[in-house]
Image (spheres, grey):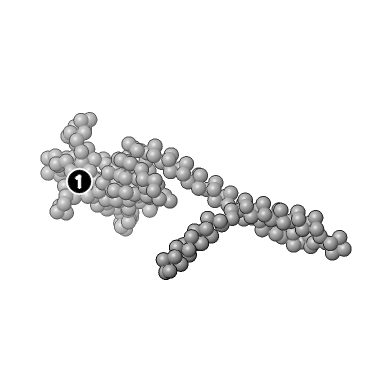
Amino acid sequence: MTTAVSGSTGTAASSSGSSLPSVQDQTNRFLTLLVTQLQNQDPLNPMDNAAITSQMAQLSTVTGIQQLNTTLSNMSASQAYQTAGLIGHTAVAPGSVIGLAADTNAKSGFSGAGGFKLPTAADNVVVKVVDSTGATVKTINMGSQDAGVGLFAWDGTTDAGGVAAAGTYKFVVDATASGNSVSPVALTAGNVNSVLLNGATPTLNISGLGNVPVSSVLEVL
């Protein structure tokens, strides 16, 4: 007996959920009822025009919102698939990782790149590449820099005159303006390996950074 009641309730709930009217259905029903009321109204006591106008305005608003949601959804999907065109490009996003990889075009045989974002112009900017122990491997003097995004390249050479081993390093950016410290944001430049489209905002998988929302990317090279 208990099983039968449970099954009956589940069926009723399912039927109720599947019979929810759409906006178009509600519009059709409203117009059908309106025409019927107009055809059968008392000529001596006609329907209130203001009430009819108000109901039609509310229905029009609901329909407009539904169409707007559909349009925005289509735009988001289109933008997401356009983002897939970034695969293979170099993206710049907040991060302090720099990868040193083999490069046949570089004199040392290796190269790496990173960047920074300055809130204001700086008289002097110095980038220090450090290894896993925190020891400075390479010091790169960038001189004066304007406010905004700046990029730097590392040829793999070390301050000691040798060549660093290929791998992943970190870097620190120091900047000053008129003797005062400026707070730069370190930026990592990495290759876009793939694009994830399973969320509201497309996510890029960037070498050295992992998954990064496309909204966090500052520049694509």
Whether residue 143 is visible: no
Residue plotted at (12% across, 44% down): 160
Taking 49 as reference, is 192 above or below it?
Answer: above
Q: Quadrant of the C terminus?
A: top left
Taking 194 as reference, is 24 above or below it?
Answer: below
The one of 214 and 162 positioned closer to us in this rendering? 214
Residue 50 screen position, x and y as percent: 76, 61
**In this view, which residue lies farthest toward the bottom?**
2
Quadrant of the rendered structure where residue 164 is?
A: top left
The one of 180 and 135 positioned closer to us in this rendering? 135
Residue 88 screen position, x and y as percent: 32, 36
The one of 24 and 110 positioned closer to us in this rendering? 24
Taking 45 as reference, is 111 above or below it?
Answer: above
The one of 184 and 132 positioned closer to us in this rendering? 132
Quadrant of the rendered structure where residue 167 is?
A: top left
Left or right of 76: which side holds 212?
Answer: left
Residue plotted at (33% across, 41% down): 194
Residue at the disc numbered 1: 168
Left or right of 213: which side holds 164?
Answer: left
**In this view, which residue lies farthest toward the front?**
1
At label 1, which amino acid type do we have? Thr
Residue 205 screen position, x and y as percent: 32, 45
Residue plotted at (39% across, 39% down): 84
The local crowd at label 1, few if under 14, some if 14 to 19, many if 20 or more residues have their Cα within 10 Å, is some
Residue 214 screen position, x and y as percent: 39, 47
Residue plotted at (55% across, 46% down): 71
Whether residue 220 is visible: yes
Left or right of 174: which side holds 51?
Answer: right
